[in-house]
Amino acid sequence: MIDLVKQCITMSIPLVLIALAGFFSERGGVINIGLEGKTLLACFFSVAFSSKFGPIPGLALTIIATSLVSLIHWLLTQVYRMDHIISGMAINLLATGATSFFKFRFAADGLQDSAVPPKMLLYALGIIAPIALYWLSHKTKFGLQHRSAGSDPDKARLLGINPQNIRFSALVGTGVLCALAGSLLVAETPQFTDGMTSGRGYIALAALILGGWRPVNAALACLLFGAASALQIQYNGQYIPSEAWKSLPYIVTLFAIAGFLGKNRTPAGLGKP
Amino acid sequence: MKILALIAGGIVLFLASLWAAGANPVTAISQLVTGSVGSASALSGTVREMTPLLILGVSVFLALKAGLFNIGAEGQFVIGACFSAATMLAIGGPLGVVAGVLVGAISGGLWALPAGYIKAFRNGHEVITTIMLNNIAINLTKWLVSGPFKGEKAVSATSATLPVNSQLTPLFKIGQFELPQAVVVGVLLTIGVGYWLSKTTSGYELRAAGANPTAAEFAGVKTKQVTVKAMFLSGAIAGIAGALQIAQFEHRFYDGSSVGYGFDALGVALLAGGNAYGLFASSFLFGALNKGGTSLMGLGIDKGITTMVLAIVIIIFAAVKYRQRGGRND
Protein backbone atom coordinates (compact mmCIF):
# COMPACT_ATOMS: atom_id res chain seq x y z
CA MET A 1 0.00 0.00 0.00
CA ILE A 2 2.78 2.39 0.99
CA ASP A 3 4.59 1.34 -2.17
CA LEU A 4 1.50 2.09 -4.20
CA VAL A 5 1.18 5.60 -2.73
CA LYS A 6 4.87 6.23 -3.29
CA GLN A 7 4.64 5.00 -6.87
CA CYS A 8 1.57 7.14 -7.41
CA ILE A 9 3.43 10.27 -6.25
CA THR A 10 6.47 9.41 -8.37
CA MET A 11 4.29 9.04 -11.44
CA SER A 12 2.03 12.05 -10.80
CA ILE A 13 4.22 14.95 -9.69
CA PRO A 14 6.28 15.25 -12.90
CA LEU A 15 2.99 15.21 -14.81
CA VAL A 16 1.62 17.95 -12.56
CA LEU A 17 4.63 20.16 -13.25
CA ILE A 18 4.41 19.61 -17.02
CA ALA A 19 0.64 20.13 -17.08
CA LEU A 20 1.04 23.42 -15.21
CA ALA A 21 3.76 24.41 -17.66
CA GLY A 22 1.13 23.85 -20.30
CA PHE A 23 -1.36 25.87 -18.25
CA PHE A 24 0.96 28.88 -18.38
CA SER A 25 1.19 28.95 -22.15
CA GLU A 26 -2.26 27.67 -23.13
CA ARG A 27 -4.19 29.99 -20.79
CA GLY A 28 -2.15 32.79 -22.30
CA GLY A 29 -3.17 31.72 -25.81
CA VAL A 30 -0.18 29.71 -27.05
CA ILE A 31 -1.02 26.12 -28.03
CA ASN A 32 1.71 23.97 -26.57
CA ILE A 33 2.37 20.70 -28.35
CA GLY A 34 6.02 21.31 -27.51
CA LEU A 35 5.83 20.33 -23.83
CA GLU A 36 7.32 16.92 -24.57
CA GLY A 37 10.37 18.41 -26.27
CA LYS A 38 10.91 21.11 -23.66
CA THR A 39 10.81 18.58 -20.84
CA LEU A 40 13.17 16.27 -22.73
CA LEU A 41 15.61 19.16 -23.18
CA ALA A 42 15.25 19.96 -19.47
CA CYS A 43 16.25 16.36 -18.62
CA PHE A 44 19.29 16.74 -20.84
CA PHE A 45 20.26 20.13 -19.37
CA SER A 46 19.78 18.78 -15.87
CA VAL A 47 22.21 15.90 -16.42
CA ALA A 48 24.71 18.05 -18.32
CA PHE A 49 24.74 20.96 -15.84
CA SER A 50 24.37 19.00 -12.60
CA SER A 51 27.26 16.70 -13.43
CA LYS A 52 29.46 19.71 -14.01
CA PHE A 53 28.33 22.27 -11.45
CA GLY A 54 26.55 20.29 -8.71
CA PRO A 55 22.84 20.02 -7.87
CA ILE A 56 21.75 23.57 -6.98
CA PRO A 57 23.69 25.50 -9.66
CA GLY A 58 22.70 22.71 -12.03
CA LEU A 59 19.04 23.24 -11.26
CA ALA A 60 19.38 27.01 -11.67
CA LEU A 61 21.12 26.64 -15.03
CA THR A 62 18.53 24.09 -16.17
CA ILE A 63 15.79 26.59 -15.38
CA ILE A 64 17.56 29.33 -17.32
CA ALA A 65 18.32 27.14 -20.33
CA THR A 66 14.83 25.65 -20.55
CA SER A 67 13.26 29.10 -20.25
CA LEU A 68 15.41 30.25 -23.16
CA VAL A 69 14.19 27.30 -25.22
CA SER A 70 10.64 28.18 -24.28
CA LEU A 71 11.32 31.70 -25.51
CA ILE A 72 12.22 30.27 -28.93
CA HIS A 73 8.60 29.14 -28.94
CA TRP A 74 7.56 32.70 -28.13
CA LEU A 75 9.78 34.04 -30.90
CA LEU A 76 8.30 31.65 -33.46
CA THR A 77 4.64 32.04 -32.54
CA GLN A 78 4.51 35.70 -31.52
CA VAL A 79 7.23 37.43 -33.55
CA TYR A 80 7.28 35.21 -36.63
CA ARG A 81 3.54 34.50 -36.30
CA MET A 82 4.15 30.90 -37.14
CA ASP A 83 1.38 28.37 -36.77
CA HIS A 84 1.43 27.25 -33.13
CA ILE A 85 1.13 23.56 -33.91
CA ILE A 86 3.89 23.50 -36.50
CA SER A 87 6.25 25.39 -34.22
CA GLY A 88 5.47 23.08 -31.31
CA MET A 89 6.10 19.99 -33.42
CA ALA A 90 9.33 21.53 -34.71
CA ILE A 91 10.49 22.14 -31.14
CA ASN A 92 9.78 18.51 -30.27
CA LEU A 93 11.75 17.41 -33.32
CA LEU A 94 14.61 19.77 -32.49
CA ALA A 95 14.69 18.50 -28.91
CA THR A 96 14.70 14.83 -29.94
CA GLY A 97 17.51 15.44 -32.42
CA ALA A 98 19.61 17.75 -30.27
CA THR A 99 19.50 15.66 -27.09
CA SER A 100 20.37 12.48 -28.95
CA PHE A 101 23.14 14.27 -30.86
CA PHE A 102 24.73 15.92 -27.83
CA LYS A 103 24.24 13.28 -25.17
CA PHE A 104 27.57 11.49 -25.69
CA ARG A 105 29.45 14.74 -25.52
CA PHE A 106 27.70 16.38 -22.57
CA ALA A 107 25.65 13.78 -20.74
CA ALA A 108 27.38 10.48 -21.35
CA ASP A 109 27.62 9.25 -17.77
CA GLY A 110 25.02 9.03 -15.05
CA LEU A 111 25.02 11.50 -12.18
CA GLN A 112 27.01 10.92 -9.01
CA ASP A 113 24.91 10.80 -5.83
CA SER A 114 26.25 14.20 -4.82
CA ALA A 115 25.09 15.77 -8.11
CA VAL A 116 21.49 14.50 -8.18
CA PRO A 117 18.93 17.36 -8.28
CA PRO A 118 17.20 18.06 -4.92
CA LYS A 119 14.38 15.52 -5.14
CA MET A 120 12.42 16.51 -2.03
CA LEU A 121 12.43 20.18 -2.94
CA LEU A 122 11.11 19.35 -6.41
CA TYR A 123 8.34 17.15 -5.02
CA ALA A 124 7.38 19.91 -2.59
CA LEU A 125 7.26 22.43 -5.45
CA GLY A 126 5.10 20.05 -7.44
CA ILE A 127 2.61 19.87 -4.59
CA ILE A 128 2.54 23.61 -3.94
CA ALA A 129 2.49 24.60 -7.62
CA PRO A 130 -1.21 23.99 -8.40
CA ILE A 131 -2.35 26.15 -5.50
CA ALA A 132 0.27 28.81 -6.22
CA LEU A 133 -0.83 28.95 -9.84
CA TYR A 134 -4.48 29.11 -8.86
CA TRP A 135 -3.65 32.10 -6.69
CA LEU A 136 -1.55 33.70 -9.41
CA SER A 137 -4.26 33.19 -11.98
CA HIS A 138 -7.25 34.35 -9.94
CA LYS A 139 -5.95 36.81 -7.37
CA THR A 140 -3.28 38.85 -9.11
CA LYS A 141 -3.22 41.47 -11.82
CA PHE A 142 -0.88 39.35 -13.92
CA GLY A 143 -3.32 36.46 -13.70
CA LEU A 144 -6.15 38.61 -15.02
CA GLN A 145 -4.05 39.93 -17.90
CA HIS A 146 -2.77 36.42 -18.59
CA ARG A 147 -6.26 34.98 -18.87
CA SER A 148 -7.46 37.87 -20.99
CA ALA A 149 -4.58 37.35 -23.45
CA GLY A 150 -5.73 33.76 -23.82
CA SER A 151 -9.47 34.36 -23.91
CA ASP A 152 -9.73 37.31 -26.24
CA PRO A 153 -6.48 38.87 -27.41
CA ASP A 154 -8.26 41.55 -29.43
CA LYS A 155 -10.26 42.83 -26.47
CA ALA A 156 -7.14 42.64 -24.32
CA ARG A 157 -5.48 45.00 -26.79
CA LEU A 158 -8.40 47.43 -26.47
CA LEU A 159 -7.79 47.49 -22.72
CA GLY A 160 -4.15 48.39 -23.28
CA ILE A 161 -2.75 44.95 -22.56
CA ASN A 162 -0.21 43.66 -25.04
CA PRO A 163 -0.85 39.91 -25.41
CA GLN A 164 2.60 39.40 -26.92
CA ASN A 165 4.26 40.72 -23.75
CA ILE A 166 2.02 38.70 -21.46
CA ARG A 167 2.78 35.59 -23.46
CA PHE A 168 6.50 36.29 -23.07
CA SER A 169 6.19 35.95 -19.30
CA ALA A 170 3.83 33.00 -19.70
CA LEU A 171 6.34 31.11 -21.81
CA VAL A 172 9.11 31.85 -19.31
CA GLY A 173 6.77 30.27 -16.74
CA THR A 174 6.35 27.27 -19.03
CA GLY A 175 10.11 26.94 -19.30
CA VAL A 176 10.62 27.12 -15.52
CA LEU A 177 8.03 24.43 -14.82
CA CYS A 178 9.30 22.16 -17.60
CA ALA A 179 12.80 22.57 -16.11
CA LEU A 180 11.51 21.49 -12.70
CA ALA A 181 9.74 18.50 -14.24
CA GLY A 182 12.84 17.46 -16.22
CA SER A 183 15.04 17.80 -13.14
CA LEU A 184 12.62 15.68 -11.15
CA LEU A 185 12.71 12.92 -13.78
CA VAL A 186 16.50 13.05 -13.65
CA ALA A 187 16.43 12.97 -9.83
CA GLU A 188 14.49 9.70 -10.05
CA THR A 189 16.73 8.05 -12.67
CA PRO A 190 20.01 10.01 -12.65
CA GLN A 191 20.97 9.42 -16.27
CA PHE A 192 19.96 10.74 -19.67
CA THR A 193 18.45 8.30 -22.14
CA ASP A 194 16.88 9.09 -25.52
CA GLY A 195 13.20 9.94 -25.21
CA MET A 196 13.25 9.52 -21.42
CA THR A 197 10.12 11.67 -21.08
CA SER A 198 8.30 8.82 -22.88
CA GLY A 199 5.20 10.75 -23.86
CA ARG A 200 4.68 12.50 -20.51
CA GLY A 201 4.38 15.82 -22.33
CA TYR A 202 1.36 14.55 -24.21
CA ILE A 203 -0.22 12.90 -21.16
CA ALA A 204 0.21 16.16 -19.24
CA LEU A 205 -1.43 18.04 -22.09
CA ALA A 206 -4.27 15.54 -21.90
CA ALA A 207 -4.58 16.16 -18.15
CA LEU A 208 -4.65 19.91 -18.75
CA ILE A 209 -7.53 19.50 -21.20
CA LEU A 210 -9.33 17.08 -18.90
CA GLY A 211 -8.94 19.62 -16.08
CA GLY A 212 -10.56 22.29 -18.23
CA TRP A 213 -7.37 24.41 -18.31
CA ARG A 214 -7.61 25.00 -14.53
CA PRO A 215 -4.50 24.43 -12.40
CA VAL A 216 -6.01 22.48 -9.50
CA ASN A 217 -8.30 20.38 -11.71
CA ALA A 218 -5.42 19.66 -14.08
CA ALA A 219 -3.29 18.52 -11.12
CA LEU A 220 -6.11 16.21 -10.02
CA ALA A 221 -6.29 14.77 -13.54
CA CYS A 222 -2.51 14.14 -13.35
CA LEU A 223 -3.07 12.35 -10.05
CA LEU A 224 -5.67 10.18 -11.75
CA PHE A 225 -3.32 9.32 -14.64
CA GLY A 226 -0.44 8.81 -12.19
CA ALA A 227 -2.53 6.46 -10.08
CA ALA A 228 -3.47 4.48 -13.19
CA SER A 229 0.20 3.98 -14.13
CA ALA A 230 1.12 3.20 -10.51
CA LEU A 231 -1.54 0.46 -10.42
CA GLN A 232 -0.30 -0.83 -13.74
CA ILE A 233 3.28 -1.01 -12.44
CA GLN A 234 2.13 -2.61 -9.18
CA TYR A 235 0.08 -5.35 -10.82
CA ASN A 236 2.32 -5.61 -13.87
CA GLY A 237 -0.51 -6.40 -16.27
CA GLN A 238 -1.93 -9.23 -14.13
CA TYR A 239 -5.62 -8.49 -14.49
CA ILE A 240 -5.72 -6.07 -17.38
CA PRO A 241 -3.00 -5.87 -20.09
CA SER A 242 -0.54 -3.09 -19.28
CA GLU A 243 -1.16 -1.62 -22.73
CA ALA A 244 -4.78 -1.03 -21.77
CA TRP A 245 -3.71 0.84 -18.63
CA LYS A 246 -1.30 2.93 -20.66
CA SER A 247 -4.04 3.80 -23.14
CA LEU A 248 -6.48 4.83 -20.43
CA PRO A 249 -5.43 8.51 -20.15
CA TYR A 250 -5.67 8.92 -23.90
CA ILE A 251 -9.09 7.31 -24.16
CA VAL A 252 -10.44 9.43 -21.29
CA THR A 253 -9.04 12.53 -22.98
CA LEU A 254 -10.70 11.66 -26.29
CA PHE A 255 -14.04 11.61 -24.52
CA ALA A 256 -13.23 14.81 -22.68
CA ILE A 257 -12.36 16.63 -25.91
CA ALA A 258 -15.51 15.32 -27.53
CA GLY A 259 -17.36 17.03 -24.69
CA PHE A 260 -18.88 13.83 -23.33
CA LEU A 261 -17.47 14.55 -19.88
CA GLY A 262 -18.96 17.99 -19.39
CA LYS A 263 -18.67 21.38 -21.00
CA ASN A 264 -15.81 22.19 -23.37
CA ARG A 265 -13.71 24.88 -21.67
CA THR A 266 -11.07 25.59 -24.32
CA PRO A 267 -9.65 29.12 -23.91
CA ALA A 268 -11.28 31.05 -26.75
CA GLY A 269 -8.13 32.84 -27.88
CA LEU A 270 -6.02 29.70 -28.09
CA GLY A 271 -3.73 29.92 -31.11
CA LYS A 272 -4.91 33.39 -32.11
CA PRO A 273 -2.33 36.09 -32.81
CA MET B 1 14.62 40.59 -43.33
CA LYS B 2 13.20 38.64 -40.38
CA ILE B 3 13.21 35.53 -42.54
CA LEU B 4 16.84 36.04 -43.53
CA ALA B 5 17.71 36.28 -39.84
CA LEU B 6 15.90 33.01 -39.24
CA ILE B 7 17.73 31.25 -42.09
CA ALA B 8 21.08 32.58 -40.90
CA GLY B 9 20.20 31.47 -37.37
CA GLY B 10 19.36 27.99 -38.64
CA ILE B 11 22.66 27.63 -40.50
CA VAL B 12 24.63 28.93 -37.52
CA LEU B 13 22.79 26.50 -35.23
CA PHE B 14 23.59 23.58 -37.54
CA LEU B 15 27.30 24.42 -37.90
CA ALA B 16 27.67 25.28 -34.22
CA SER B 17 26.09 21.94 -33.30
CA LEU B 18 28.56 20.02 -35.44
CA TRP B 19 31.42 22.03 -34.02
CA ALA B 20 30.26 21.62 -30.44
CA ALA B 21 30.03 17.86 -30.90
CA GLY B 22 33.59 17.87 -32.21
CA ALA B 23 32.81 16.96 -35.82
CA ASN B 24 34.23 18.53 -38.93
CA PRO B 25 31.32 20.12 -40.85
CA VAL B 26 32.89 19.49 -44.26
CA THR B 27 33.46 15.78 -43.62
CA ALA B 28 30.02 15.44 -42.08
CA ILE B 29 28.20 17.09 -44.96
CA SER B 30 30.14 15.17 -47.63
CA GLN B 31 29.45 11.90 -45.77
CA LEU B 32 25.77 12.85 -45.63
CA VAL B 33 25.73 13.33 -49.40
CA THR B 34 27.72 10.19 -50.36
CA GLY B 35 25.79 8.12 -47.83
CA SER B 36 22.47 9.06 -49.36
CA VAL B 37 22.98 9.51 -53.12
CA GLY B 38 26.68 8.72 -53.62
CA SER B 39 26.24 5.17 -54.96
CA ALA B 40 23.55 2.97 -56.47
CA SER B 41 23.06 1.05 -53.22
CA ALA B 42 22.95 4.29 -51.19
CA LEU B 43 20.34 5.62 -53.59
CA SER B 44 18.32 2.42 -53.17
CA GLY B 45 18.39 2.98 -49.43
CA THR B 46 17.21 6.55 -49.89
CA VAL B 47 14.30 5.38 -52.08
CA ARG B 48 13.41 2.81 -49.44
CA GLU B 49 13.34 5.51 -46.77
CA MET B 50 11.45 7.80 -49.12
CA THR B 51 8.63 5.33 -49.88
CA PRO B 52 6.61 5.44 -46.62
CA LEU B 53 7.32 9.17 -46.34
CA LEU B 54 5.91 9.86 -49.82
CA ILE B 55 2.68 7.94 -49.20
CA LEU B 56 2.25 9.34 -45.70
CA GLY B 57 3.12 12.74 -47.13
CA VAL B 58 0.15 12.42 -49.51
CA SER B 59 -2.02 11.48 -46.54
CA VAL B 60 -1.01 14.51 -44.47
CA PHE B 61 -1.08 16.75 -47.55
CA LEU B 62 -4.69 15.82 -48.32
CA ALA B 63 -5.75 16.57 -44.75
CA LEU B 64 -3.81 19.83 -44.80
CA LYS B 65 -5.74 20.92 -47.89
CA ALA B 66 -8.95 20.38 -45.93
CA GLY B 67 -7.56 22.54 -43.13
CA LEU B 68 -6.71 19.59 -40.88
CA PHE B 69 -3.40 18.79 -39.20
CA ASN B 70 -3.30 15.03 -39.29
CA ILE B 71 -0.60 14.33 -36.68
CA GLY B 72 -2.28 10.92 -36.52
CA ALA B 73 -0.65 9.51 -39.66
CA GLU B 74 1.70 7.63 -37.35
CA GLY B 75 -1.15 5.80 -35.61
CA GLN B 76 -3.04 5.17 -38.84
CA PHE B 77 0.17 3.77 -40.33
CA VAL B 78 0.76 1.23 -37.54
CA ILE B 79 -2.91 0.22 -37.44
CA GLY B 80 -2.90 -0.29 -41.21
CA ALA B 81 0.39 -2.19 -41.05
CA CYS B 82 -0.77 -4.44 -38.22
CA PHE B 83 -4.17 -5.40 -39.62
CA SER B 84 -2.89 -5.77 -43.18
CA ALA B 85 -0.08 -8.05 -41.97
CA ALA B 86 -2.65 -10.23 -40.21
CA THR B 87 -4.75 -10.32 -43.38
CA MET B 88 -1.82 -11.12 -45.67
CA LEU B 89 -0.79 -13.94 -43.34
CA ALA B 90 -4.32 -15.32 -43.15
CA ILE B 91 -5.01 -15.34 -46.89
CA GLY B 92 -1.52 -15.68 -48.33
CA GLY B 93 -0.31 -15.29 -51.91
CA PRO B 94 -0.77 -12.29 -54.19
CA LEU B 95 -4.49 -12.20 -53.38
CA GLY B 96 -3.53 -11.80 -49.72
CA VAL B 97 -1.48 -8.73 -50.61
CA VAL B 98 -4.42 -7.13 -52.40
CA ALA B 99 -6.76 -7.93 -49.51
CA GLY B 100 -4.11 -6.75 -47.04
CA VAL B 101 -3.75 -3.36 -48.70
CA LEU B 102 -7.53 -3.01 -48.73
CA VAL B 103 -7.78 -3.90 -45.05
CA GLY B 104 -4.89 -1.53 -44.31
CA ALA B 105 -6.75 1.32 -46.06
CA ILE B 106 -10.04 0.63 -44.30
CA SER B 107 -8.54 0.20 -40.84
CA GLY B 108 -6.38 3.32 -41.23
CA GLY B 109 -9.41 5.30 -42.38
CA LEU B 110 -11.57 4.06 -39.53
CA TRP B 111 -8.82 4.88 -37.03
CA ALA B 112 -8.84 8.49 -38.25
CA LEU B 113 -12.61 8.75 -38.16
CA PRO B 114 -13.06 9.74 -34.47
CA ALA B 115 -10.69 12.67 -35.01
CA GLY B 116 -12.73 13.82 -38.00
CA TYR B 117 -16.01 13.41 -36.18
CA ILE B 118 -14.84 15.23 -33.05
CA LYS B 119 -13.43 18.06 -35.17
CA ALA B 120 -16.58 18.46 -37.27
CA PHE B 121 -19.36 17.87 -34.78
CA ARG B 122 -17.89 18.28 -31.27
CA ASN B 123 -15.49 21.15 -31.92
CA GLY B 124 -12.39 19.39 -30.55
CA HIS B 125 -8.98 20.13 -32.06
CA GLU B 126 -7.78 17.34 -34.36
CA VAL B 127 -4.17 17.67 -33.25
CA ILE B 128 -4.94 16.65 -29.69
CA THR B 129 -7.32 13.87 -30.73
CA THR B 130 -4.92 12.41 -33.28
CA ILE B 131 -2.06 12.45 -30.77
CA MET B 132 -4.30 10.54 -28.36
CA LEU B 133 -5.27 8.10 -31.13
CA ASN B 134 -1.57 7.60 -31.98
CA ASN B 135 -0.77 6.49 -28.47
CA ILE B 136 -3.79 4.22 -28.32
CA ALA B 137 -2.84 2.72 -31.70
CA ILE B 138 0.73 2.07 -30.59
CA ASN B 139 -0.46 0.36 -27.40
CA LEU B 140 -3.17 -1.62 -29.21
CA THR B 141 -0.86 -2.96 -31.91
CA LYS B 142 1.80 -3.75 -29.33
CA TRP B 143 -0.73 -5.82 -27.42
CA LEU B 144 -2.02 -7.52 -30.58
CA VAL B 145 1.43 -8.49 -31.76
CA SER B 146 2.50 -9.83 -28.39
CA GLY B 147 -0.76 -11.80 -28.05
CA PRO B 148 -3.33 -12.71 -30.71
CA PHE B 149 -1.21 -11.83 -33.77
CA LYS B 150 2.07 -13.17 -32.45
CA GLY B 151 3.84 -15.60 -34.78
CA GLU B 152 3.88 -19.21 -33.56
CA LYS B 153 7.63 -19.52 -33.26
CA ALA B 154 8.26 -15.85 -32.48
CA VAL B 155 10.28 -15.11 -29.34
CA SER B 156 9.71 -11.36 -29.27
CA ALA B 157 6.59 -9.33 -30.05
CA THR B 158 6.39 -9.95 -33.78
CA SER B 159 4.02 -11.53 -36.25
CA ALA B 160 5.01 -14.47 -38.45
CA THR B 161 6.95 -13.66 -41.64
CA LEU B 162 4.95 -13.34 -44.86
CA PRO B 163 5.19 -16.29 -47.25
CA VAL B 164 7.54 -15.54 -50.15
CA ASN B 165 4.69 -15.26 -52.67
CA SER B 166 3.13 -12.45 -50.60
CA GLN B 167 6.32 -10.41 -50.46
CA LEU B 168 6.45 -7.64 -53.05
CA THR B 169 9.55 -7.90 -55.19
CA PRO B 170 11.38 -4.87 -56.60
CA LEU B 171 9.85 -3.64 -59.86
CA PHE B 172 13.28 -3.80 -61.47
CA LYS B 173 16.91 -4.04 -60.53
CA ILE B 174 19.82 -2.35 -62.32
CA GLY B 175 23.07 -3.41 -60.71
CA GLN B 176 22.87 -2.31 -57.09
CA PHE B 177 19.83 -0.13 -57.63
CA GLU B 178 16.38 -1.48 -56.83
CA LEU B 179 13.09 0.25 -57.52
CA PRO B 180 10.42 -0.95 -55.09
CA GLN B 181 6.84 -1.40 -56.34
CA ALA B 182 5.59 0.48 -53.30
CA VAL B 183 7.24 3.72 -54.40
CA VAL B 184 5.48 3.39 -57.76
CA VAL B 185 2.16 3.09 -55.93
CA GLY B 186 3.18 6.19 -53.97
CA VAL B 187 3.88 8.12 -57.17
CA LEU B 188 0.51 7.08 -58.65
CA LEU B 189 -1.29 8.03 -55.43
CA THR B 190 0.40 11.42 -55.42
CA ILE B 191 -0.59 12.11 -59.01
CA GLY B 192 -4.11 10.81 -58.37
CA VAL B 193 -4.66 12.94 -55.28
CA GLY B 194 -3.09 15.97 -56.99
CA TYR B 195 -5.45 15.54 -59.93
CA TRP B 196 -8.49 14.92 -57.72
CA LEU B 197 -7.84 18.03 -55.65
CA SER B 198 -7.26 20.38 -58.55
CA LYS B 199 -9.58 19.07 -61.27
CA THR B 200 -12.72 17.65 -59.67
CA THR B 201 -15.71 19.20 -57.94
CA SER B 202 -15.38 17.15 -54.77
CA GLY B 203 -11.67 17.98 -54.63
CA TYR B 204 -12.51 21.63 -55.00
CA GLU B 205 -15.07 21.41 -52.20
CA LEU B 206 -12.43 19.91 -49.94
CA ARG B 207 -10.02 22.73 -50.68
CA ALA B 208 -12.74 25.34 -50.22
CA ALA B 209 -13.65 23.88 -46.82
CA GLY B 210 -9.99 24.08 -45.85
CA ALA B 211 -9.34 27.57 -47.14
CA ASN B 212 -12.40 29.32 -45.76
CA PRO B 213 -15.03 27.15 -44.05
CA THR B 214 -17.52 30.00 -43.58
CA ALA B 215 -17.45 30.99 -47.25
CA ALA B 216 -17.58 27.36 -48.32
CA GLU B 217 -20.60 26.72 -46.12
CA PHE B 218 -22.27 29.78 -47.62
CA ALA B 219 -21.56 28.48 -51.11
CA GLY B 220 -23.37 25.25 -50.28
CA VAL B 221 -20.47 22.98 -49.30
CA LYS B 222 -21.33 20.68 -46.43
CA THR B 223 -18.09 21.44 -44.59
CA LYS B 224 -18.71 19.10 -41.66
CA GLN B 225 -19.18 16.10 -43.94
CA VAL B 226 -16.18 17.17 -46.01
CA THR B 227 -14.04 17.31 -42.85
CA VAL B 228 -15.03 13.78 -41.85
CA LYS B 229 -14.47 12.52 -45.39
CA ALA B 230 -11.06 14.18 -45.66
CA MET B 231 -9.95 12.68 -42.36
CA PHE B 232 -11.12 9.22 -43.44
CA LEU B 233 -9.30 9.45 -46.79
CA SER B 234 -6.16 10.74 -45.12
CA GLY B 235 -6.24 7.84 -42.66
CA ALA B 236 -6.90 5.36 -45.47
CA ILE B 237 -3.84 6.53 -47.40
CA ALA B 238 -1.72 6.31 -44.24
CA GLY B 239 -3.07 2.77 -43.78
CA ILE B 240 -2.01 1.90 -47.33
CA ALA B 241 1.48 3.17 -46.49
CA GLY B 242 1.55 0.79 -43.53
CA ALA B 243 0.34 -2.17 -45.60
CA LEU B 244 2.89 -1.56 -48.36
CA GLN B 245 5.68 -1.16 -45.82
CA ILE B 246 4.93 -4.68 -44.60
CA ALA B 247 4.46 -6.24 -48.05
CA GLN B 248 7.47 -4.62 -49.67
CA PHE B 249 10.09 -4.11 -46.96
CA GLU B 250 9.44 -5.53 -43.50
CA HIS B 251 7.58 -8.78 -44.39
CA ARG B 252 6.27 -8.97 -40.81
CA PHE B 253 4.70 -6.64 -38.29
CA TYR B 254 6.52 -5.97 -35.05
CA ASP B 255 6.34 -3.40 -32.28
CA GLY B 256 8.27 -0.43 -33.65
CA SER B 257 7.57 -1.08 -37.35
CA SER B 258 7.34 2.67 -37.70
CA VAL B 259 10.28 4.76 -36.56
CA GLY B 260 8.24 7.94 -36.43
CA TYR B 261 7.45 8.05 -40.16
CA GLY B 262 4.11 9.71 -39.41
CA PHE B 263 5.78 12.68 -37.74
CA ASP B 264 8.35 13.07 -40.51
CA ALA B 265 5.42 13.01 -42.94
CA LEU B 266 4.10 16.22 -41.46
CA GLY B 267 7.40 17.84 -42.40
CA VAL B 268 7.23 16.27 -45.86
CA ALA B 269 3.74 17.64 -46.47
CA LEU B 270 4.55 21.10 -45.10
CA LEU B 271 7.69 21.32 -47.19
CA ALA B 272 5.76 20.41 -50.34
CA GLY B 273 4.00 23.76 -49.95
CA GLY B 274 0.65 23.87 -51.66
CA ASN B 275 1.71 21.58 -54.49
CA ALA B 276 1.10 17.81 -54.47
CA TYR B 277 4.00 17.22 -56.86
CA GLY B 278 6.28 19.00 -54.39
CA LEU B 279 5.86 15.84 -52.30
CA PHE B 280 8.29 14.02 -54.61
CA ALA B 281 11.08 16.45 -53.82
CA SER B 282 10.34 16.80 -50.12
CA SER B 283 9.98 13.06 -49.45
CA PHE B 284 13.20 12.47 -51.37
CA LEU B 285 14.99 15.07 -49.24
CA PHE B 286 13.69 13.55 -46.02
CA GLY B 287 14.54 10.05 -47.27
CA ALA B 288 18.06 11.15 -48.16
CA LEU B 289 18.54 12.75 -44.74
CA ASN B 290 17.32 9.59 -42.99
CA LYS B 291 19.59 7.36 -45.06
CA GLY B 292 22.56 9.75 -44.91
CA GLY B 293 22.05 10.11 -41.16
CA THR B 294 22.53 6.39 -40.70
CA SER B 295 25.79 6.51 -42.64
CA LEU B 296 26.97 9.42 -40.46
CA MET B 297 27.09 7.02 -37.56
CA GLY B 298 30.16 5.49 -39.22
CA LEU B 299 31.91 8.79 -38.51
CA GLY B 300 30.81 8.68 -34.89
CA ILE B 301 28.25 11.44 -35.47
CA ASP B 302 24.85 10.67 -34.02
CA LYS B 303 22.02 10.76 -36.57
CA GLY B 304 20.21 13.16 -34.25
CA ILE B 305 21.88 15.90 -36.29
CA THR B 306 19.68 15.07 -39.28
CA THR B 307 16.57 15.32 -37.09
CA MET B 308 17.79 18.77 -36.10
CA VAL B 309 18.27 19.71 -39.74
CA LEU B 310 14.70 18.62 -40.48
CA ALA B 311 13.38 20.69 -37.60
CA ILE B 312 15.30 23.76 -38.76
CA VAL B 313 14.07 23.29 -42.34
CA ILE B 314 10.47 22.99 -41.10
CA ILE B 315 10.79 26.10 -38.93
CA ILE B 316 12.21 28.21 -41.74
CA PHE B 317 9.68 26.94 -44.21
CA ALA B 318 6.74 27.40 -41.87
CA ALA B 319 7.86 30.95 -41.05
CA VAL B 320 7.69 31.75 -44.75
CA LYS B 321 4.59 29.80 -45.65
CA TYR B 322 2.36 29.27 -42.63
CA ARG B 323 2.21 32.68 -41.02
CA GLN B 324 -0.88 33.91 -39.27
CA ARG B 325 -2.44 37.18 -40.20
CA GLY B 326 -4.12 39.72 -37.96
CA GLY B 327 -3.20 41.12 -34.59
CA ARG B 328 -1.84 44.60 -34.20
CA ASN B 329 1.83 44.94 -33.41
CA ASP B 330 3.09 43.17 -36.50
Image: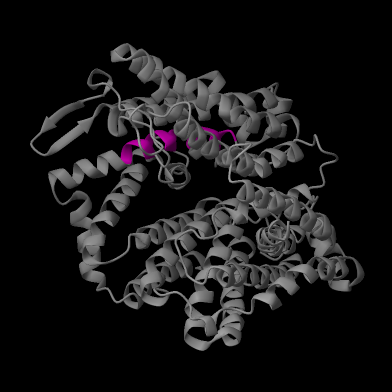
What's the residue at 26%, 61% (across, down)? B297
Residue A48: x, y in percent?
Answer: 47, 78
Colouring method of the image: one colour
Q: Is residue A218 above or below residue B131?
A: below
Frontmost residue, A97 versus A190: A190
Side (left or right) of A112 relative to B48: right
Q: Nearer the viewer, residue A40 or A221?
A: A221
Q: Is residue A52 visible?
A: yes
Number of marks in the image?
Answer: 0
Q: Residue at x 41, y 75 (%)?
A: A109
Q: Position of residue B202 (x, y in %)?
A: 56, 20
Q: Which residues are magenta?
A: B50-66
Quarter placement of the C terminus of chain B? bottom right
| Residue B299 image offset from top left, x and y in percent | 22, 66
Whether residue A84 appears in this view of the structure is: no
A123 is within the stretch colored magenta: no
User: In terms of secondary structure, what is the magenta stretch mainly?
Assistant: helix
Quadrant for residue A10, please give it. Answer: bottom right
